[in-house]
Amino acid sequence: PIIKTSKGTFVPPYKGETLNVFLSSISTDETLNIVNPVLLENNTTRQFFNELGIKEVDESVYIDKRIAKYTDQREIRIDQNVEDIEQFYIYALKVPHDKRNSFIQKLRENLTIQCKQGKNVIFSKLSDVYSDKWVDTFFKGCNDVKLLSVASYASLFDKYGKNKILEFLYEIGLRENPEPRIEQHSGYDAYSIPRTLSDKQRAKIYFPDLRPTYGISITDYIIDGFKNAVSNNLTLEMSKNIWSWLCECPFEFGELICRYLYKNDSRRFRTE
């Protein structure tokens, strides 16, 4: 049989073994086929649909379709993005416990959000974007860091509370605090390395039995925005904020230790 939808089109109830039409939906997604509501006014017709296995759309199907837009890397408008995040937030409050982890992981892997990078407004994965928490300290005047476009999501902040929306965004990947990341530099030798270091670092590093032709990899811990923060005219308040953040960092990151490794060798040299 074919069934008339709410859009006036006629579709088969199944595509293969997958249900292709539903009794009703909370979704505004036009790709879902919904039974024409006039047909449901007849009890016999409704019973026939029930026997066919046609049922109300599972909300998880609706949510997965929204996520799929980001998986397919379609061009997303900001109003669509705001609506999607609202629906994801609402669903996260009631999703069954056994499905929550996979739902959150899908959002982490696929969802993008509008952010500012210098003067540009772009969409980016949440894992590459910071909230506005440190915008006036670490990231003030920093043009190479992606910051959440707060104005774009003002309606959600007003409706549900900024802290609640941010907590949800943190859970699905938005960065809250400046994070250390590893930056690898390869192919240095004993002659070139000293020229990359400060006088203090160069005085404390030594290379026993190291021949100049041996390649060395340099691994640095870089903290997004840190150089920008300390190079600005620091106020007492900014200094306190920075120290407060540093005190919460893992010890090895707080010291910003640089490690110098032989390629394919376990011996290690470090500057203190």
Image (tube, grey):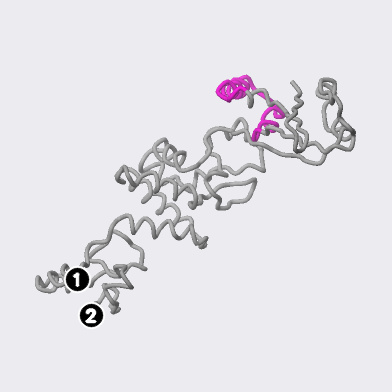
Q: Find residue 202 and report its horizontal and vertical position in percent.
A: 84, 24
Majority secondary structure of the magenta segment? helix
Q: Residue at x 44, y 47 (%)?
A: 105
Of 250 and 35, the residue lying toward us: 250
How crowded is the residue under tag 2: few (<14 C-alpha within 10 Å), some, or many (20+)?
A: few
Q: Residue at x 71, y 33 (%)?
A: 220
Indicate the amino acid at tag 2. Pro
Q: Secondary structure at mark 1?
A: helix
Where residue 184 appears, as percent x and y from the top left, is 72, 39
x and y, in percent, of residue 25 in the image = 27, 61
As displayed, is residue 16 above or below residue 200? below
Give the residues drawn in magenta, as a range. Answer: 223-251
Reply above or below: 136 against 158. above
- Residue receiving disc 2: 1
Observer-nearest of 214 and 79: 214
Q: Is residue 105 left or right of residue 39?
A: right
User: What is the number of callouts on the image?
Assistant: 2
Q: Quadrant of the N terminus?
A: bottom left
| Sequence-first disc among 1 and 2 | 2
**Which residue, given by chain and number where applicable, does mark 1 sit on?**
52
